[in-house]
Amino acid sequence: MDRNLVAFLAVARSGTLTDAADTLGLTQPTLTKRIARLEAGLGVRLFERGRRGSALTEAGRVFLCRAERIEAEYRQCLEEVKAISAAGFSSMRIGAGPLFHLTCVASLFDHLRAKFPDLKLELVTQTYNNSGQLLLEGDIDVYLGIIPAEQIDDSVFVRYLTTVEHGLILRSDNPIARQKTIDPSELSDYTWVSFSMDPVTERAFLEFTVPKGSNDSLIDIRTTSFVAGLQLVQTGKFVMSAPLQLARVVEKEDLVIRPSRAGMPKRSAGLHLRKSALHYAAVKSVLGFFDDISPSYFDC
């Protein structure tokens, strides 16, 4: 991609010439010259320089929208060209929500390594609220889980694999856990733990546990570790939500998971990837892996 355009994007995203130069591995004078050449070619100033950094002008903001499109098209072009090679990737970054990384990712990685021994694999257990952006920007190659429709566009291929509904995790000796279903309002005195940012689930439980009109947050503790969340619940002072399909994982820790009495939103979850990568041999292998499993596979 044009190096002046790369320079512009780096400065626009970092807000300072110093940080952008460090990101690109350039000297600041070199970066400044590239921005100056771009502005001269366009006949407008793209940045206003001040003590606090470089802020986009109105023309710069317009140019940024187009530049990001060019960057995305360039990335997709590279992916399509690289598809003629063995796996299509030298490394593959797979993002996965809790249900998927606790059930099938290990088997998927084993499947991929058997076919592509030189392929490097990385698991990214990203949060719910930015997975679509990470996929579109090329920071992950495949996402397994839930991505809200508003976070993706028609450049993304989606295959739904299962339906997710959240329940509540408690210690098995908790009297409330003896009920087949739980009224979340009975847990208003507990400390709530979230191991992934999921606004849909949080809003649903918020209706039952926080008085209307209150600005209180439902979640007191956030963690990116499912195991740490389970350990907190084991103390008896905490409650956490998770997909009901993770019952076996939960029960191994002497905990139980129960449905909400009022029900929770049921959402489709599955495989997401950029359409431009569909020709990659490694991506075809991922699709083939999921061709061979049924929705019940995720009931771990």
Image (cartoon, rainbow, N blue to C red):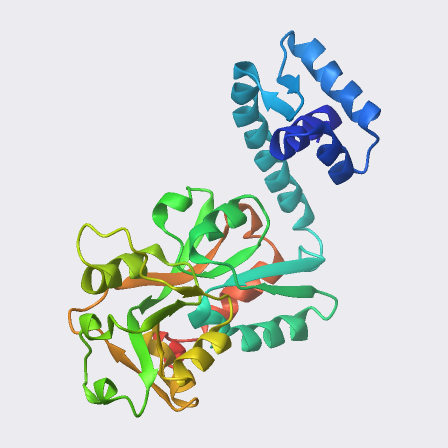
Residue located 62% across and 29% down the image? 12
Q: Position of residue 114 (x, y in %)?
A: 66, 75
Indicate left or right for 67 with 104 as reference. right
Residue located 30% across and 57% down the image? 200
Residue toward you, 20 or 287: 20
Indicate left or right for 297 with 31 as reference. left
Q: Position of residue 118 (x, y in %)?
A: 75, 67
Quarter containing the C terminus: bottom left
Residue toward you, 139 or 292: 139
Q: Position of residue 193 (x, y in %)?
A: 39, 69
Q: Is residue 265 visible?
A: no
Residue toward you, 230 or 273: 230
Residue sitting farthest toward the top: 43
Residue located 83% across and 23% down the image? 29
Indicate left or right for 297 with 206 as reference. right
Q: Position of residue 217 (x, y in %)?
A: 32, 57
Quarter containing the N terminus: top right
Quadrant of the rendered image containing residue 20 = top right
User: In the rendered image of this protein, does residue 203 appear above or below residue 223?
Assistant: above
Q: Is residue 8 visible?
A: yes
User: In the rendered image of this protein, does residue 35 appear above or below residue 184?
Assistant: above
Tell how many labels: 0
Quadrant of the rendered image containing residue 299 = bottom left
User: In the rendered image of this protein, does residue 244 appear above or below residue 147?
Assistant: below
